[in-house]
Image (tube, grey):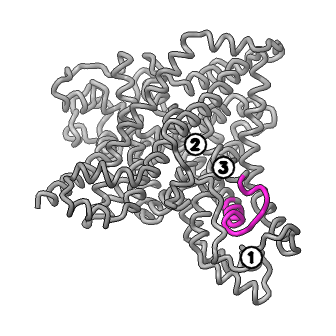
Amino acid sequence: MKQKIGLAVGVVLVLVWCLLPVAWILSLSFKSQSAVSNGSDPGFLPLDSFTGLDNYRAVWEDDQFRRAIINSIGISLIATLLSVMIATLAAYAIARLEFRGKKMVLTTALAIAMFPVVSLVSPLFDLWRTIGLYDTWPGLILPYMSFTLPLAIWTLSAFFREIPWEMEQAAQVDGATSWQAFRKVIVPLAAPGVFTAAILTFFFAWNDFVFGITLTSTENARPIPAALSFFVGPDPFQRPAGLLAAAAVIATIPIVVIVLLFQRKIVAGLTSGAVKG
Amino acid sequence: MTTTVATPETDATKGPKGKRTPPQLTERARHENNLGRRLVAPAVVVMLVVTAFPILRALWLSFYSYSLTAPEEREFIGISNYVTALTDQLFWRDIGITVLYMVVTVAFELVIGFAFALVMHRVIFARGLIRTSILIPYGIITVVSGFAWQFAFTYQNGFVNGWLPFIDADFNWFGDTVPAVIAIMVSEIWKTTPFMSLLLLAGLAQVSEDMVEAAKVDGATWWQRMWKVVIPNMRAAIMVAVLFRALDAYRIFDNIFVMTAGAQGTESISFLTYRQSIEQFQLGMGSALAVLLFLSVLLVAFLIVKLFRVDLAQARGE
């Protein structure tokens, strides 16, 4: 009995820890700017400063923010798609084929996962300006791909090792080449793993901030996190907390939807590589 | 993130193919070798294009005095940038602050994350709800977490001052180094503890229940079971989680940018590098700092692996 109560308390603590800041930013997004700046309504429930959807409307009418949403969705989706495609090929080779240089591929991936992103900022900034990738979608898609590939390759090769390979061999016995066996037999079996890798990749791209602020300068390619940090609002000397909160909530909606739909897959993906490799 | 450098097993499921190790490659083996290389080639190229090439370029640029405000005045100055950086107190101060962020946040994440993992491991009700909740901090944009906590800590409209009885209602968390660093750490710990707890949960799942039961039958208390049975048996998982989180924490940037913009001495080494190259257009100096940052990450990784004897292969549960 004592243990059960302890466990219930534990569960409540976990939930409060995870959801408190989310509740806070949600509550701010419904408060009026004046109430937030003079602190007249400091509670979690927006009582007398409740402004309904005003903040959301104002954010939505902001051209820069609308562009940032489009940029973020477009860039993250394209980077995810390309990264997962390339990673699938590589992970298949790593999980299944014997070839020279396999160790080197895995070491490279590990090294890149640990790479200090900021150290690339000045050379990439310089390089992208020279070759015209600065402030464009491809200018962000490329670095996102490089930095999500290690995660995608590990997750996928962990999944691929769980696949019943007799089926591949059966196909090969029936006369299929390695490539055909890969495409016709393995791809359908591997689809769930690929999907998980795609979610994790998407999270990374959606979350990125360093590349977002350094490799863009206008709403041409600026993604949401960068747009949020540059969001000034009407009064340059006062951070528009209500508006920012509303924008932050909008930026979090895709994450919440993905988490609600695919929580099991995400947890499996996050832990698979760590435990089984 | 995930963790393995070990080569995949050449086990029995591979059948006759796995046993093939004659000195001369057969036709089929050569075909496999070529296919393997062709399949990994795109990934390797993409990973290297945006990392290896720029870091080499940074190495080259770091020997120049090169400012974007006066690009035509670029000149070779040898190791002057490095001498300037390494003899500047600010550089060492920022390194110190960065190490502080890393040590404190990882320590808290490990303890809280382990507690969370225990709860998730034992609980039988509301599993979906807990999993969903724990993935929200993991998935949320770091910038949003930074804003949420900044608004929580400000004395004008935050709730933190009101909730903490020993803090004055008008205490300014962002007015001095120590409280500002604490606020940044809180945001960092909040956002990344779930990731840590999921890795630890995976480690917990590998600890044999029979062993824990046996210890219980022998009269071991809860603490003894934790310290003598559970934790030693998931040591590898803990070490890998620490390694990955520590290297991530060492690169701390987003929260600092959003919450203090590096003011009040909260600047990390990543932030210093960013400020030199992007805000002040000193690409030469910025590149030198980038190279130093890169080397310091290597050093930190090396030290953690050596000090804690992290065995990446062992983490696979073999």
Vertical placement of A37 versus A173: above or below?
above
| Near-viewer residue (A74 or A242) | A74
Q: Amino acid at mark 1?
A: Lys
Q: In front of the other: label 3 or label 1?
A: 1
Q: CA distance from mark 3 to mark 1?
A: 26 Å
The quadrant of the rendering that contains the N terminus of chain A is bottom left
Q: Residue B212: x and y, percent? A: 29, 61
| Near-viewer residue (B83 or A56) | B83
Q: Residue B187: x and y, percent? A: 38, 36
Vertical placement of B310 versus B171: above or below?
below
Judging by the rendered image, the residue that carries numbered circle 3 is A109
Judging by the rendered image, the residue that carries numbered circle 1 is B17
Do marks 3 and 1 both belong to one polypeptide chain? Answer: no
Q: The disc numbered 2 marks a residue on which chain?
A: A
Vertical placement of A146 versus A240: above or below?
below
Magenta segment: A87-103
Q: Is residue A172 magenta?
A: no
Residue B281 visible in rendering: yes
Residue A152 placement, left or right of B307:
right
Q: Amino acid at mark 2?
A: Pro
Q: Amino acid at mark 3?
A: Ala
Judging by the rendered image, the residue that carries numbered circle 2 is A223
Residue A177 placement, left or right of B269:
right
Q: Residue B138: x and y, percent? A: 43, 49
| Near-viewer residue (B83 or A246) | B83
Q: Residue B173: x and y, percent? A: 32, 22
Q: The disc numbered 3 marks a residue on which chain?
A: A
